[in-house]
Amino acid sequence: MSKRKTYRLGDFVAQFGGELIGSPKVRISQVAALESARSTDIAFVSQDRYRSRLDRCRAGAVILGPDARESTRLPRIVCTNPYSYFAKVSALLNPPVAARPGIARNAAVDKSARIAKSAEVGVHAVIAKGAHIGEKAVIGAGCYVGEGTRIGAETRLYANVTIYHGCTIGKRCLLHSGVVVGADGFGIARDEGGWQKIPQIGGVVIGDDVEIGANTTIDRGTLDDTVIEDGVKLDNQIQIAHNVRIGAHTAIAACAGIAGSAQIGRNCALGGASMIRGHVTIADNVTVSPGTLIMKSLERPGTYTGIYPFSSHQDWLRNATHLRQLDKLAKRIRALERILDKAERNPS
Amino acid sequence: MSKRKTYRLGDFVAQFGGELIGSPKVRISQVAALESARSTDIAFVSQDRYRSRLDRCRAGAVILGPDARESTRLPRIVCTNPYSYFAKVSALLNPPVAARPGIARNAAVDKSARIAKSAEVGVHAVIAKGAHIGEKAVIGAGCYVGEGTRIGAETRLYANVTIYHGCTIGKRCLLHSGVVVGADGFGIARDEGGWQKIPQIGGVVIGDDVEIGANTTIDRGTLDDTVIEDGVKLDNQIQIAHNVRIGAHTAIAACAGIAGSAQIGRNCALGGASMIRGHVTIADNVTVSPGTLIMKSLERPGTYTGIYPFSSHQDWLRNATHLRQLDKLAKRIRALERILDKAERNPS
Amino acid sequence: MSKRKTYRLGDFVAQFGGELIGSPKVRISQVAALESARSTDIAFVSQDRYRSRLDRCRAGAVILGPDARESTRLPRIVCTNPYSYFAKVSALLNPPVAARPGIARNAAVDKSARIAKSAEVGVHAVIAKGAHIGEKAVIGAGCYVGEGTRIGAETRLYANVTIYHGCTIGKRCLLHSGVVVGADGFGIARDEGGWQKIPQIGGVVIGDDVEIGANTTIDRGTLDDTVIEDGVKLDNQIQIAHNVRIGAHTAIAACAGIAGSAQIGRNCALGGASMIRGHVTIADNVTVSPGTLIMKSLERPGTYTGIYPFSSHQDWLRNATHLRQLDKLAKRIRALERILDKAERNPS
């Protein structure tokens, strides 16, 4: 939208390392896909199967791994992790929009709230009593920041984010639109003929460098806090229930759900639409496949899967019906084995 | 945030019953977990496995069941349902914030809307033509209440809730942020080369004492209404399609989905991420396990489950492949049985 | 709410075809269900199993197929697709509320934004720099339209919709409350001890006549755009990840998720809570059953299913345990076959 800053290949190598093959003076203004890159763009190849696309690539330069070093004559940066290198180059070329210090005229900021001078509070945002907005933080249009809630420095809430009272968000976090942090956990007790609500008096504590995708919800704790540790990355439409703890640098794909009091380790990767039962504990470095329901604690790192393999509907009908008879099938096998076993021991 | 009211143990027993062992004069100001409770807190034990934690507990008092009566020397209240008792004590100690009567200066209230004198309408809220807000109701910041919609007495909409036109919400309900009530049901008819939208002219009727979690959506009916009966408790990110009816006091965990025209009974419990097919009928007192897809009507109470059991990814690969061959496996068993059966009848 | 326009049966037939049996002068003011229809309503029967309800029907007229032609003596319209015919009649009787041209006094419209004279911008809406709102478009209360985003003619955003910068929405679209279009895709690269965010610099391009249900999220592309083609119909709480393409006239039911870079064909139907893995390609005219996870590309039209069939919890426990032993069961069958095969070849 504004004039884009350009860099030279030499700038990248000076800043991020890697081996440069070609002129350090090549000017790059943007990242692009291999197929659509132009002479001022830099592209990347991280997987062998994309290497063939290099032939027709018109990028100004390419980032690639040692194996692909000679796959092109384009100016190139050879490095061990092309994807991460590309991410860094893109982050340099596409820096986040800086906060525009000040409070929009029609925002509603309680007089007891503390807003850093360098922070931006957008149109129609609401900052409640005693809330605190850190340096260079951005509160988007229409956001609600509840009583006593603290937003760390350089954290950005996109438009229409809601944070309830008594929550803490760390530094350099990104919260996308529709996120709700701090709504009541689902705490109800069976009562005569109905349910008694259990007040949710814990809060939510979110560490630094956490990203939270659109329409994701993180409930406040019942008595103690729900905790999201540093560097956690959450995709869209994830549900995190009360008193969950997510360990540092764990990444969770869209539509996953973590039920109450589950404890997820560090550096885990949970696939899209995976579901974690309440009260279970997941070790560090666990990967859960998409669509998998984890019903008990996982004490060891590794990849865990529970996906019903799809097939044509006809095949599914034919096969799935036996699932309700599996125990009988197993017994019939056992019976056959017994007969043959007996026959062998007593040959007629 | 404000000064907390304290109670004596004797007050609890006078109000909620139970047997008090210890001084009725012990002062309690808050509920807490067994591990973190201090001398002014009351904790509870509802399950045997937590009983061992009583040894180190420093609470001012504990709520427990008859079996655990002698498990501690702390002042204690013995009752049949400690969890529900605890819920009541917590509700007493943590009453909902009362409505602050009045309409925020920058709310947008149509002049034909009726707002009870004791109701609170928050900053940037929008109340459309002919809407009605009941006594002591709270409409949070940024909420939208559509044309002709009625919000019952003492109902609270947290910030950024959206209710379309022509809906009715009962008394003492809680709607959390991001909830959308009354959006169009997904009604489309196949047409030449595309889809014809079917106008959704029904409404949504929600009973009394209903709680609706963050980002849950409840669609309006196609012709007749979508109905949520009294005392229903809905967790976050639940989808309720057009013309569904949810029976009184049914509780539904997060990420569940109820497809169009499904009829759910009273006192049911649907697990997280469970899915109910359209047009099915579920009897009263049915429990559906998490992640289970119910594809046909359930006429009897009971617990129903359909979860693919997870395993290590390697084990899953090895085992899951046979699911597409189950019918063949079953036929091979049948063939073996025939051979042996024949052999037995005609021994060689 | 306002006075309803009435039509005569003859008007319907003149406009939509079909054979009229009965007087063309019968006045109809609304559509209704067979059971509740009154003399000024028109009802429809599209499936045999509902035909018996015609006996007690008090509608002013009924729409039905050739087979049901003589099932009632009520005035009736006979046509080949009663459901679609009904949809058209209902659309005529229930036209969308027209835009009320003008910008609400307390909307926040950047002076560089272009708003068509005939467009409506609601209370507390925010229209950012350089955005463009087309003729007769409606931007609901509390909506956010980001920098440079274009909203096509006659498109309606209900209250509290969020569209990020640089997105394009076509003509005659409907976006329901809580929809988020253009949030960052979930792009992160493993880095020393954490994750490096990949800036999402693509946009979202949505065609004409697209409907998007409440709280559905559509992420912007990483480098190129995420694309929703003309006539796509999306239900509530669907997640569409970065760089997905959804082919024209595909319909997707609630709670479905489409992972990054998946390409969905035209005229597909994806069931509720179905999940499509990243990078797969789905052919035109594919139907995916509810709750099914598609893990690889589908090259042929057809219906695909992968649902774990539910049963009583006891039965499930008994049967599901064998899933972790399926490979062993298959081997035991093979062993039995070998024994019998050998026995047959070498009869003792």
Image (cartoon, coloured by chain):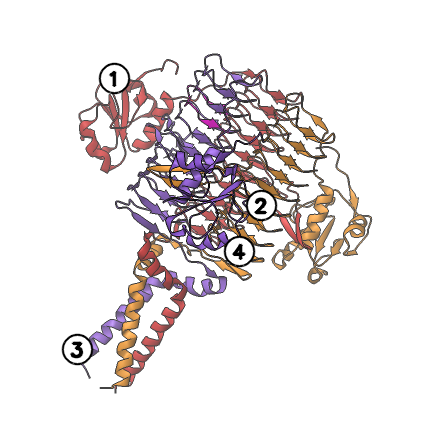
Chain colours: A red, B orange, C purple
Q: Is residue A139 magenta?
A: no
Is label 4 in a helix, a strand or a loop?
strand
Figure quadrant of residue B187: top left
- Which residue type does callout 4 highlight? Ile
- Which residue type does callout 3 highlight? Arg
Please indicate whether residue A213 sits to the left or right of residue B112 in the image: left
Q: What distance separates the C-alpha of mark 1 from that of mark 4?
A: 67 Å
Q: Quadrant of the N terminus of chain B?
A: top right
The front one of B175 and B27 is B175
Q: For mark 4, what is the residue?
A: B282
> What subunit carries mark 2?
B
Figure quadrant of residue B135: top right
The prevailing secondary structure element of the residues shown in magenta is: loop
The span picked out in magenta is C143-158
- Which residue type does callout 2 highlight? Val
- Which residue type does callout 1 highlight? Val
Q: For mark 1, what is the residue?
A: A26
Q: What distance separates the C-alpha of mark 1 from that of mark 2?
A: 65 Å
Are the residues at dot 3 and dot 2 in contact (C-beta closer than 8 Å)? Answer: no
In the displayed structure, would residue B151 be above or below residue C68? Answer: above
User: Which of labels 4 and 2 is toward the front?
Assistant: 2
Are the residues at dot 3 and dot 4 in contact (C-beta closer than 8 Å)? Answer: no
Label 2, residues with CA under 10 Å away: few <14, some 14-19, many ≥20: many
Give the percent coordinates (x, y) of residue C272: 43, 45
Q: What distance separates the C-alpha of mark 4 from that of mark 2?
A: 15 Å
Q: What distance separates the C-alpha of mark 3 from that of mark 4?
A: 56 Å
Q: For mark 3, what is the residue?
A: C345
Q: What distance separates the C-alpha of mark 3 from that of mark 2?
A: 69 Å
Residue C304 visible in the picture: yes
Q: What distance separates the C-alpha of mark 1 from that of mark 3?
A: 77 Å
Q: Do the residues at discs 1 and 4 belong to one chain?
A: no
Give the percent coordinates (x, y) of residue B345: 28, 85
